[in-house]
Image (tube, rainbow, N blue to C red):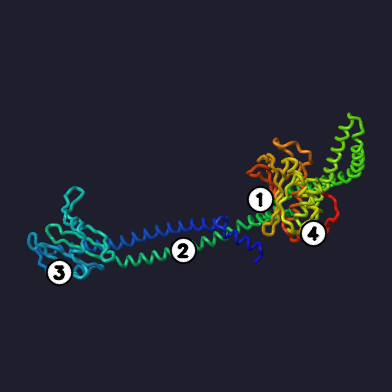
Amino acid sequence: MTETAKRSLRAGLRWTSLRLRLVVVFALVALVAAVSASGIAYWLNREAVLTRTQDTALDDFRRQMQETAAALPTRPTKDDLQRAAGEMASSSPGYSVLLVAERERGKPIVGYSDLDTFTRAHVPDSLQEQVARKQPLSSSNEHEYHLFWQRTSIAGTPYLVAGTRIIGGGPTGYMLKSLDQERQDLNSLAWSLGIATALALVGSALLAQAAATTVLRPVQRLGDAARKLGEGKLDTRLVVSGTDELADLSRTFNRTASSLEKKVADMSAREEASRRFVADMSHELRTPLTAITAVAEVLEDEADTLDPMIAPAVHLVVSETRRLNDLVENLMEVTRFDAGTARLVLDDVDVADQVTACIDARAWLDAVHLDAERGMMARLDPRRLDVILANLIGNALKHGGSPVGVRVRTEGEELVIEVRDHGPGIPEEVLPHVFDRFYKASASRPRSEGSGLGLSIAMENAHIHGGDISAANSPDGGAVFTLRLPRDAERIVRNDEPGADAPGEDGAT
């Protein structure tokens, strides 16, 4: 399976994916529609089946009461009732009959078609009360007694129970018809509708998947193209076919990608031209600056013999010349990083000795307190480590003031060097920008005399080692810069990479 196919499968399985949501929505709509249709069909069929069975049984029972029960004597015997109930049940569409009469007032006699199936105890009391109640006669009611029925359940089996009374003193009759066959038929219907609902659900899911594949394939291609575009492949384009909205979106993407490619190409060209200009300018300035620096140093040596009115100007020229020389060197170093030509020249370094050498070379021994164990080895570029330390310690001395503490330790495979000053600290709004090029903004510190490139160059040198530098304020006051470098930078950059710097290359700040 290709990586694109795997990514598509993972995207389709995510709960937040459009494909899954589309399938779920289709399935839910189909489920609701199928359940609703099945429920309505089941209810209509149930009513139709029960009504048909009920009407057939009630019509037959009414006819049997009129023909058989009404023909009995006014004071029938138990045998008369038993025989009539049997006749009615034998000619009925599957129901049992119970006939009740009075031998004397208050002395009822009962005739059963089937004593094991249907007794008076099976007739609900509410139904018996309705059947026995004499109805008032009116223009809308011509009969004293009516036929009443009720659906009930006996031992878990559904039944239809009905009853009526012969007008003019005849017996009261009750019928009991089992609805178990109808229940089985309705259960079969329910199973059929359930299977149809399940099949509709599966079918809707398959249709939704097919629709999602059809609709989302262009969207997926658009997403892959946008991902490639974000990775820097600016020549990515989509194949456009059709005239629908997705085709318009693909055309818009292609136009946007073309415009972006052109703008990036223009910006890259301008950036390259700017970088070449800075590099060329820096190289062109080095020769006259070397001469100016030599003259300035001669003037500085003779400053004490010059006119007191001229000596301050000479000192200013010397100071600004050195500053300009540092700026040119920093610009050349920045140009190397921007051009990607900066390389590491790795060596096994005793970190404590390297830090001591950096401090000693700049006569900072009296202002810096070093906390480092001898023999702590790391494979680094000693020149670039010196550049980082010189910028961090020099920045701490210039802006924070002495004493400056330098602490060296290891954390696993990392070398950690902390440089802490005891100054006013760095304002919170300045912290995110301290490593930006040419950034110099702090009301609580003196105006910087540097170029604004020192910390940026230190960060670039840390990055080329595979490390990083962070800046923070100590709870006890002062700023803390933490340098983290891998103890073995060989994993980051190999010594045999083309374009590596020669061991004696200049570029320190």
> Which comes before the other along the chain, label 3 or label 4?
3
Can you identify the residue that label 4 sits on? 347
Label 3: state its secondary structure: helix
Query: Which residue matches tag 1?
Result: 249
**Distance from Cα at disc 3 to Cα at disc 4:** 121 Å
Using a 10 Å C-alpha cutoff, classify the residue at mark 4 as few (fewer than 14 neighbours), some (14 to 19) or many (20 or more): some
Decide if residue 133 is on the left or right side of residue 315.
Answer: left
Q: Residue at x 76, y 38 (%)?
A: 448
* Foreground pick, 287 / 16: 287
The answer to whether 17 is drawn above or below residue 285 in the figure is: below
Nearer-the-camera pick, 324 or 410: 410
Residue at (19%, 69%) from the top-left corner? 113
Dots 4, 2 in contact, CB < 8 A: no
Is residue 34 or residue 410 the one in the foreground?
A: 410
* Farthest residue, direction top: 309
Q: Secondary structure at mark 4?
A: strand
Measure how far apart labels 3 and 2 are at the Cα level: 53 Å
Marker disc for residue 112: none
Q: Is residue 293 left or right of residue 13?
A: right
- Label at residue 198: 2
Measure the C-alpha gap from mark 4 to mark 1. Answer: 55 Å
- Which amino acid lies under the numbered mark 1 shown in the image of this protein? Leu
Residue type at mark 3 is Gln
Which amino acid type is shown beneath numbered disc 4?
Asp
Q: CA distance from mark 2 to mark 1?
A: 38 Å
